[in-house]
Image (cartoon, rainbow, N blue to C red):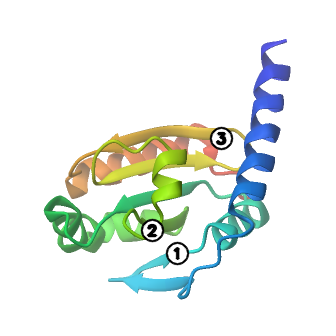
């Protein structure tokens, strides 16, 4: 019964996210931060996550956020984080441009990283500045937990 509820929840979340974001098309769907391949289009992220079976990292940020800028300069430049980012669909969401997504995900502070799987929904989230080694550790834990469904 519990497995049925989890499967049902994942299907509902996947359908809901697909329908909710279907109408959102962003001007630049992919950009690079250091060596991390960032996607800024939710439909593109969902498509890649479903196709590849990789979990998503949704990075909610703002250009005026000092801790967001610090993560850009430190955590996202870390070689371990860059290497682990290949196991994820890395997605950046500017909260000033996409207030509806901020509300939908219940974002309270910045930066916020939401880890999500296309199959099971939200895995977890981190709020505030995350130092490089801590971020690498969490990303590694998500991959090792089997949320990465690549075959």
Residue 141 falls in image quadrant: top left
Q: CA distance from mark 3 to mark 2?
A: 17 Å
Labels 1 & 3 near each other (Cβ < 8 A): no
Pointer 3 residue? 121
**117 left or right of 19 in image:** left
Q: Nearer the viewer, residue 52 or 80?
A: 52
Pointer 2 residue? 92
Where the N terminus falls, by quadrant? top right
Labels 1 & 2 near each other (Cβ < 8 A): yes
**54 left or right of 79 in image:** right
Residue 58 position, x and y percent, is 48, 57
Residue 105 position, x and y percent, is 51, 45
Residue 73 falls in image quadrant: bottom left
Residue 6 position, x and y percent, is 76, 26
Pointer 1 residue? 40
Q: Circle 1: is it few (<14), some (14-19), or many (20+) Cα within 10 Å? A: many
Q: Secondary structure at mark 2?
A: strand
The residue under the point 53% across, 43% down is 144
Q: CA distance from mark 1 to mark 3?
A: 19 Å
Q: Secondary structure at mark 1?
A: loop
Residue farthest to the top, as pictured: 1
Q: Nearer the viewer, residue 142 or 25?
A: 25
Mark closer to the chain start, 1 or 3: 1
Q: Is residue 111 visible?
A: yes
Up-down: is 70 above or below 121?
below
Q: Secondary structure at mark 3?
A: strand
């Amino acid at each position: 019964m519990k497995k049925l509820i989890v499967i049902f929840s994942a299907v509902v979340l996947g359908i809901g996210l697909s329908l909710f974001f279907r109408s959102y098309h962003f001007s630049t769907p992919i950009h690079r931060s250091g060596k991390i391949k960032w996607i800024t289009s939710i439909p593109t992220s969902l498509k890649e996550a479903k196709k590849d079976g990789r979990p998503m990292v949704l990075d909610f940020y703002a250009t005026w956020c000092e801790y967001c800028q610090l993560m850009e300069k430190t955590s996202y430049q870390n070689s371990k984080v860059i290497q682990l980012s290949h196991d994820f669909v890395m997605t950046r969401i500017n909260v000033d441009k996409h207030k509806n997504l901020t509300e939908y995900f219940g974002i309270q502070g910045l930066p916020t990283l939401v880890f999500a799987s296309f199959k099971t929904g939200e895995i977890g989230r981190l709020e505030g500045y995350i130092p490089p080694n801590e971020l690498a550790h969490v990303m590694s834990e998500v991959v090792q937990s089997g949320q990465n469904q690549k075959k």
